[in-house]
Amino acid sequence: MNFSNPTVVVFVVYILAMLGIGLYAYFSTKNLDDYILGGRSLGSFVTALSAGASDMSGWLLMGLPGAIYLTGLSESWIAIGLIIGAWLNWYLVAGRLRVHTEVQNNALTLPDYFTGRFDDQKKILRVTSALIILVFFAIYCASGMVAGARLFETLFHMPYETALWLGAFATIGYVCVGGFLAISWTDTFQAGLMIFALLLLPIVTYMSLGIGAEEFTALVETARPHAYDFVSNLSFVAILSAAAWGLGYFGQPHILVRFMAADSVKSIPAARRIGMTWMILCLAGAVGSGFVGIAYFQQHPELAAAVAGNHETVFMELTKILFNPWVVGVILAAILSAIMSTLSCQLLVCSSALTEDLYKGFIRKNASQKELVWIGRAMVLAVALLALVLAQNPDSKVLGLVAYAWAGFGAAFGPLIILSLFWKRMTLNGALVGMVVGAVTVIVWKNFFGETGIYEIIPGFAFAFVSIVVVSLLGKAPNANVTSRFEQAEEIYARDMK
C-alpha cells in the first residue's frame, strides 16, 4: 500500500474518520436500546439519509452501473421498481411501524415486534423470524464483503483474500464499537458522498467525450444496438421480475429498523420527501454512469480491458481514468460508503436478533444492559466471520447475491409487516405460516424453478400473503388484548399524523 499516493491517503483518512465516529458513538451508548435502535432519537434528515444509505449497497455503484453497461436501459426496470416500492414503503409502512413497535412494549427488533403484536407466549415467532434474519443476512452481508473486496483489490492491487479481510475490518470496527448511533451518523455522511459521486461521474464522463448528442447516440448504438430500448427483446416476465424488486422493501429489516428509530411519527413525512429525492437522484446517477460508460469505452477500446473482464467495475474504472488522484480517493470512498452503510446495518440487525431475541429471550433473561451490549458486539464479529466464509469465492457477483437475500426478506417479512399493520384480524398462526411459506418458496424457487425467469420474490410474496389471510380466517380470532393494542396504535397514528 503506497501512502504517498493521494488516492490512498484520502481513502485511509476516510476509513479513520468512520472509525472515529464509531468511537465517539461508543460514549453515547449506555444500554441495549441505544446500541440496537439509538434510543429512538433520529430526526427527519438522519432517518431519511440513513435509511437510503443502508438500502443502497455496493450494487448501486457496482451492480447496477455494470448491468446498464452490459445491456442498456432495459436493466433500469429494477430502478423503476425500487422507486415505486420505496415510496409505498415510506407512505404505508414507515409511520405505522414507528407507532406499533412502540405500543408493542417498545419493541427494539422485528422479532420483538412480532412477539408483542400477536401475543406470542411461546416465542415461536421470535425464534423463527430471528433464524430467517440470520440466514438471509449472512448472504446479504457476503454480498457487501465481495463488493468491498473488489474495491480494495482494484485500488490497492492486492490479492482478493487480503482485500476481503481489509474491507471487512473497515466496517466491523465502527459497528462493533459504536452500534446504531455510529451507523446512523456515518450513514448520513456516506449518503452525501454517494450522491456527490453518482451525479458527478456521468456528467464528467459525457463532457470528456467531446461530442454532441448525435455522436454520443451513435457510439452507444454501435456498442449496444438495443441500449436505448427499454424492453430490448425482454419478455413480460423479465420486465415484471425486474420491477418486482420494489416488493422487497416491505420486508427489509435493515430499512424497517430506521423507521422504528425515528424520534416521532411526525418526522416521517419530511423524511419521506428527503429520502425519495436522494434515492431518485442516486439511481439516475447509477443508470447514467453505466450508460455513458458504453460510449466512453467504445470511443476508447484500448482502456476497456478491465471492464471487459468484470462489467461491475465500470464505475471504478471511469473514476480512475477521468479524475485526478485526490478526487479519485473521494469517489472511491463513496463506493466504500455504499458498501459500508448497508453492511454495517445488516451486521447490527443480525447482532440484535442474536442478542435481544435469542440470548436475552432464552439464555440470560436477567442479563444486565452492559452485558447485553457486549454480547451484541460479540455477535457482530460472529456474523461477520460467517459472511466472510460465504464471500470467499472471488467469482461471486454482487447483484446476484443481493437479489437472493432481497427476495428472501421481501417474501418472508413483507406480507407479514403489511398485514400486521393494517389487518386487526390477523393471527399468530397466520403470521408464522406466512413467514415460513415466503422464505421456503424463495429458496425452493431459486434452486428448482430458476429457469422460468420469474424472480423468486414474486411467488414468495404472493404465496405468503395468501397463506396469512387463509390461515388467519380459518383460525380463532385474536384475543381482546391483541386487538386493543392494535386499535391503540391506530388511534395514536391517526392523531399524530393530522
Image (spheres, grey):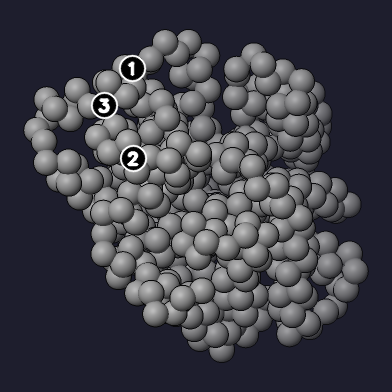
Identify the mark at residue 220; answer none if there is no mark.
3
Left or right: 85, with 140 as reference point: left
Label 1 and label 3: CA atoms lie apart by: 9 Å
- Where is 331 relative to 185, above or below? above
Q: Label 1 belongs to which residue?
A: 226
Residue 280: which quarter of the image? top left
The 10 Å Cα crowd at callout 1, few under 14, some 14 to 19, many 20 or more, is some
One can see residue 490 in this view:
yes
Amino acid type for the residue under numbered disc 3: Val
Q: Residue at x 47, y 11 (%)?
A: 236
In front here: 371 or 41?
Answer: 371
Position of residue 307 measured from the top left corner of the image (x, y, whole percent) = 43, 41
Label 2 and label 1: CA atoms lie apart by: 23 Å
One can see residue 260 in this view:
no
Q: Are marks 3 and 2 in contact (CB under 8 Å)?
A: no
Left or right: 388, with 310 as reference point: right
Position of residue 179 measured from the top left corner of the image (x, y, whole percent) = 60, 74
Q: Residue at x 52, y 79 (%)?
A: 19
Q: Nearer the viewer, mark 1 or mark 3?
A: 3
- The total of numbered circles placed on residues is 3
Amino acid type for the residue under numbered disc 1: His
